[in-house]
Amino acid sequence: MVKKCLIVLGALLVLFPTMAFAADEPSAGTLNMGLNALWVLVAGVLVLLMQGGFILLEAGSTRMKNAGHVAGKTIFTLGLCSLLYWAVGYGFAFGPDIGKFTGSGDFFFNPAIAAGETDNYPSTVFFVFQLAFAAVSLSIAWGGFAERAKLSAYLIFTLFFSGLIYPIISHWIWGGGWLAEDGSQDFAGSTVVHLTGAMGAFAATILLKPRIGKFNKDGSANEILGHNQVFTALAVLLLWIGWFGFNAGSTVAVGDGFFGYVAFNTQLGAAGGAVAALLISWLVNGKADITTMLNGALAGLVAITASCAYVEPWAAVVIGLAAGVLVFLSAKFFEKIKVDDPIYALSVHGAAGVWGTLANGLFATRTLVEKVGVGRPGLFYGGGAHQLWVQFVSVVVCGAFAFAASFVVLWAMKKLIGFRVSEEQEIIGLDLSEHGTYGYPEQMKKAAQG
Amino acid sequence: MSDTIAELRRQREEVQTRLAARFGADSPEEVSQALNALHDRLIRRVLELAEQEMMRTGRGKPPVPYAYMLFGSGGRAEQTFASDQDSGLIYADAADVARSERNRTAMHGNADCDCTFRDDFVARSERNRSAMPGIASSGCTFRDDFVARYIRAYFLALAETAVGYLKQLGYPPCEGNVMADQPAWCMPASEWAAKVDGWFEEPSWENVRHLLIVADGRCLAGDRTLADGLKDRYFRHVADRPAVASRMAENTLRHKVLVGVFGQLLAERYGASAGTLDIKYGGYIPMVNAVRLLAVRSGIRATGTLDRIAALAQAGVWSAAEAAEAREAFAEFLRLRLLASAPREDGSLPSGGQLPVRLLAREDVDRLKKALRTGKKLQRRIERETRAGFGGR
């Protein structure tokens, strides 16, 4: 009996050493910091998981012959983006401010190994979280490159986009830059992340021109169907889940549990987008289009990203529903003006990003604005048109800057080393032309023989 | 023979060009009527030529009476300038032959001078049967089988000749192989009857499709009574098995009328035919299907859609106003479908019923939309009635 008691006691001591050493209890501040750090890192990992979504989304929406390339390049550019963001990007975004235009400092970021006394979280966690955002924005831009850009173009664009363009815009709104000063509301990045990425895609798709076979001589469009709709649907779910890190994580604090409210609004926005998009495609085209519905869910998420912390639940639903309709109309519009947008990046991240940012100017409530502490209430909540104007300015300025900068980089690259693969390479597929092996060897070899 | 066919083809093209020019001046019904009269005339002439060819090559006259059936648009007398062939052939049974042979011999003596070996064979068999009643049953089977096989081969050859001539005349073969030269659509009356029985017995998707094809069957040439016999049987089955009618409804409602919730036209969005409306499958065919279904259910034997509409009004299934609305809508589809298939300037025939919406005048678009809405309303109504009668699934 005594022996048994001793064994149990010993085991308990091993499991719970504090039973023996009750001293060194953490302070409330340390606990708070630890909880914040835990949440932000989990959120950062969730955002990183969104890359899995992008891999499946882009691969599923494109043809089999490009699948390996499309999927693999996402991982490669994620790696490159991480190095760049560490070396310079983070410094431009969050380093000490210079003239409200850019940050400067913290290059080759060398963080403290733990949080300081007064910190809300360790800077390492913040870095990982911000890096994940930068990578999302980059992957959005790839939508405009799909199925025809050379592999080297991905490398070069990553250098400029992750190193410079994205960090500058995120400094403007989140890093204490001039738009932050103006009170521009973009809670988790409808503009900073999504619109910026979409503008990169826009510049790329204009310079690359449409894929072979997308448009006919008489101007009518052909449908180049993606090779796997199941991938695309699964991609949307992965992105949707990851978005809880994206939006709710952007509170960068556990605090009073406000991040739960943000997550709650996020779900409503996404739901509204999916439902509205399916219905509108059904009503207008007579068939309920799966691709449109999936785009609608993403558009709902993109739109609610800016406003998730500023609006009431009903407004989140309205923002999502409107985004679902918008993404459908926007895709029609881009096709009409003969812009080939294989992954619908321009509509999902561009159009919905603009709408989501502007929606703050309409629906932001006084209470929530005070809670977040940025800007003023929207038009419907007694704030007048002021916030709407601020939102409008930030959309126009960020959009224009992201487009112009991306365009210059890509244009110069096109002139100097070329941007698009040759016609033959495009026809045989980038898997073979850029990498030498197929993503689907059996199927593609069979197709080549047949 | 090829000269004659070439001449017929020339005639066809000439008349069709003239008819195409009558658009606008004449109503679509009139043009369609004239056009279908032309098709009927040509196909009848081709059958005569095919029979002549059989004689010329020593295979003789048709051994038994037969009926040449048109199915599909031909059956409904709604062929366009470029319709394909849908046809079938019903011939009298071998057992009936013997009876008719006996009658003929009794009436005219052995007067037929182009008596072939078949007549000879039948006559001999007849003698054998009466001479040796003891072995009649086994011998009879053998003989009947032989005659039946011979007759089958004869009509397949006849149909093959006719179908071949029609191809040369510019009637493309039916993609679904519903043609008189196919064994499945060229049978003695007894086999047709057994087949129709089987289709009603087991209304699978394919069988129901066949039943819908037969519903539009029209005897173009030959012995009408053979076709009528089959139709009698068909409509008896319909009356006995209302559930099959619901299967027919499911089968035919899958082609949706191409008009959206807001009354907008649902044109093709992609590819070479982007911006065109499939008037055939998005307007005409759904309407044909809906009207056929109601007509068959009501025991109406007319095959033309406009005739069926008139009969539905007469039978009291539709009010005069409903019939008038349906008639107007269908005439519009008929017109646009003819328009979409009219010979081009260079004489070539466009295929399919793709209507470039952009080239339509404003009032044409409005008329088309109205017609499509009527079609959709009709489809909805049938859906509702079918559900009410037989439950959803």
Image (spheres, rainbow, N blue to C red):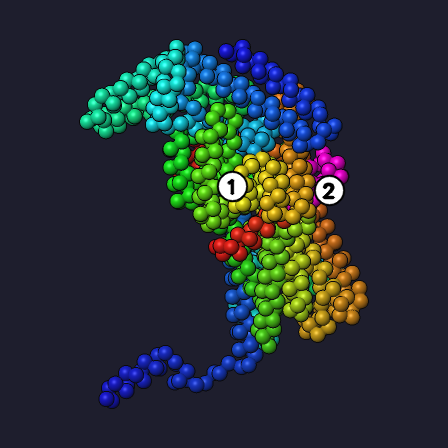
Residue behind mark 1? A63
Instruction: Look at discs 2 and 1 and give the one toward the viewer.
Output: 2
Quarter-of-image position of residue A129 = bottom right
Chain letter of disc 2 in the image: B
The verdict on residue B378 being magenta is no
Give the x, y percent position of residue A341: 62, 44
Quarter-of-image position of residue A376 = bottom right
User: Residue most toward the left?
Assistant: B134
Crowding at label 2, few (<14), some or many (≥20) Cα neighbours within 10 Å?
some
The amino acid at mark 2 is Asp
Question: What residue lies at 35% left-to-right and 79% top-to-bottom?
Answer: A14
Chain letter of disc 1 in the image: A
In depth, the one of B345 and B290 nearer the eye is B290
Numbered range of the magenta stretch: B357-374
Q: Which type of secondary structure does the marked residue at label 2 adopt?
A: helix
Q: CA distance from mark 2 to mark 1?
A: 40 Å
The amino acid at mark 1 is Arg
Give the x, y percent position of residue B62: 41, 19
Q: Is residue B393 visible?
A: yes
Question: What residue lies at 61% left-to-right and 55% top-to-bottom?
Answer: A279
Specify the label residue B366 is tagged with.
2
In depth, the one of A41 and B10 nearer the eye is B10
The verdict on residue B360 being magenta is yes
Q: Is residue B266 left or right of residue A45?
A: right
Magenta highlight: main SS = helix
Specify the label residue B159 is tagged with.
none
Give the x, y percent position of residue B112: 39, 13
